[in-house]
Amino acid sequence: MEKKSYTYEEAVDYALQIPKFTKKNTPEDTRRFYEYLGRPGERSGLIHVAGTNGKGSVCSYINAVLSGAGRRTGLFTSPHLVDVRERFRLDGEMISKEEFARCFNQVMDSVKAFCEKNQEEYHPTFFEMLFFISMLWFQEKRADYIILETGMGGRLDATNVIEKPLVTVITRIGLDHTEYLGNTKAEIAAEKAGIIKKGVPVVFWEQEEEVNEVIVKKAREMSAEVIPVSEKQVVLFKFKNKSVDFSMRSGYYEYIRASLSTRAVYQKENAALAVCALEVLSRSCPITRQQVENGLSQAKWEGRMEEVLPGVFIDGAHNEDGMQAFLESVREDGCRGKRHLLFSAVADKRVEPMAQRIVDSGLFEDVAIARLDSARSLTEEQLDSLWSGRNQVRLYHSPEQAMEALLEKKRPEDEVYAAGSLYLAGQLKAYLEKRKQKQQL
């Protein structure tokens, strides 16, 4: 591998091309290269989060509280919606283009040296590359805490090379990525529970018994303290003025109350998980109840019932459970007019149950459908077939065209929603930002 210094644009382009020429590495290979890098970031306090739905939101809530409490906090999440740098944040700020390029070049130089030293071929996958960049950057910035969101799984995830996090968190488990993780929630839970480490407390959301049993069994095998969180702990819940009043009983704090800045009612669940994770962290470095409540109130997470224009909301719901949570939030919106939905999805998701839940909800006056600008997208034919026989469904050539059509028909009292894929959320956010800039010229 010839040594080269990449600019930011070249580094991003190279990273995006990685899936075309790399194979999936074994966890052992990933771990060996991470050790060759010097296990960067492990002098910080690590928080590791896995699950099907809500991982990024839990990370965001924990990050907001720690940053608000004066801790220097690194946040690594996925996927990004518009800019790859969204995945790397220090105290809420994205990594700069110069820092991204520098850390990318450091990884690439290390890959070359590693291969030469061991007389073998190795190349990080796309996700591994971003993980290594994040850990090098966070170490350079001397983060007090690093919050790591797993990618697709847990047990085999690149982030799972870390050895001693302070706490692990497992969010709600649902049927997603079944071709890789298993066909039942219990099988998927077993993959997610792979992040549980020996003697490290695990916070998880209680749901079906088959899921709970898998997580508890794994925790006992690892002599890890088990901290279940459930709806029973949420003692007050109100939805008003585009915010969620959230309250819960807890052990360390006794009682937490905050107004979450979101229209997503499902965020009360993710906030509760974050609070219990923060309780664990407070054992070694106290965080006050006031700091927790302030941080929860300040937290924002893009693409989750995000109001991108007045009365226009984008949600990243991309599986059956996520769609149900999205619909529950829409049901509480207090809309005085009509609701319109823009839907699209990728082909490797369980799209039929999502579409059926939308139809059964009866919440929307009409549905606009369009193919995503992605090779993974459902085709126009597949979308048309999925919604065949449904009234008030119209196919458009692109999400942008569909959004313009919905905005044109939207009255002031109406509301427009977009859901079905994080790709859709990202594509629309990028389009609406360009649209806004044009209007300002």
Image (cartoon, rainbow, N blue to C red):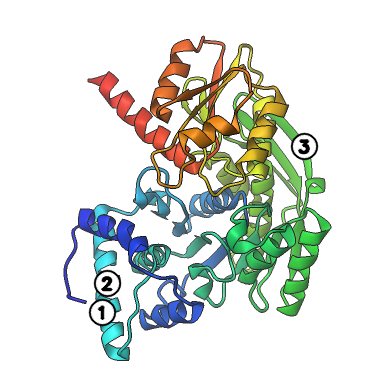
* Label 2 to label 3: alpha-carbon separation: 51 Å
36 or 389: nearer the viewer: 389
* Label 1 to label 2: alpha-carbon separation: 6 Å
Please name the amino acid that badge 1 sits on: Lys
Q: Residues within 10 Å of mark 3 (few under 14, many from 20)?
A: few
Mark 3 or mark 2, which is nearer the start of the sequence? Answer: 2
Residue 108: mark:
2
Q: Residue at x 74, y 66 (%)?
A: 215
Left or right: 229 in relation to 152: right
Q: Are marks 1 and 2 in contact (CB under 8 Å)?
A: yes
Residue 112: mark:
1
Q: Residue at x 46, y 51 (%)?
A: 79
The percent coordinates of residue 222 (x first, y second) are 70, 78
Residue 236: mark:
3
Which of the 4 quarters of the picture holds residue 404?
A: top left
Q: Residue at x 37, y 66 (%)?
A: 129
* Label 1 to label 3: alpha-carbon separation: 56 Å
Q: Residue at x 45, y 47 (%)?
A: 376
Please name the amino acid that badge 3 sits on: Leu
Rendered view: 192 above or below 291: below
The percent coordinates of residue 332 (x first, y second) are 69, 26
Tag 2, which secondary structure? helix
Q: Is residue 258 visible?
A: no
Residue 214: mark:
none
Please name the amino acid that badge 2 sits on: Met
256 or 378: nearer the viewer: 378
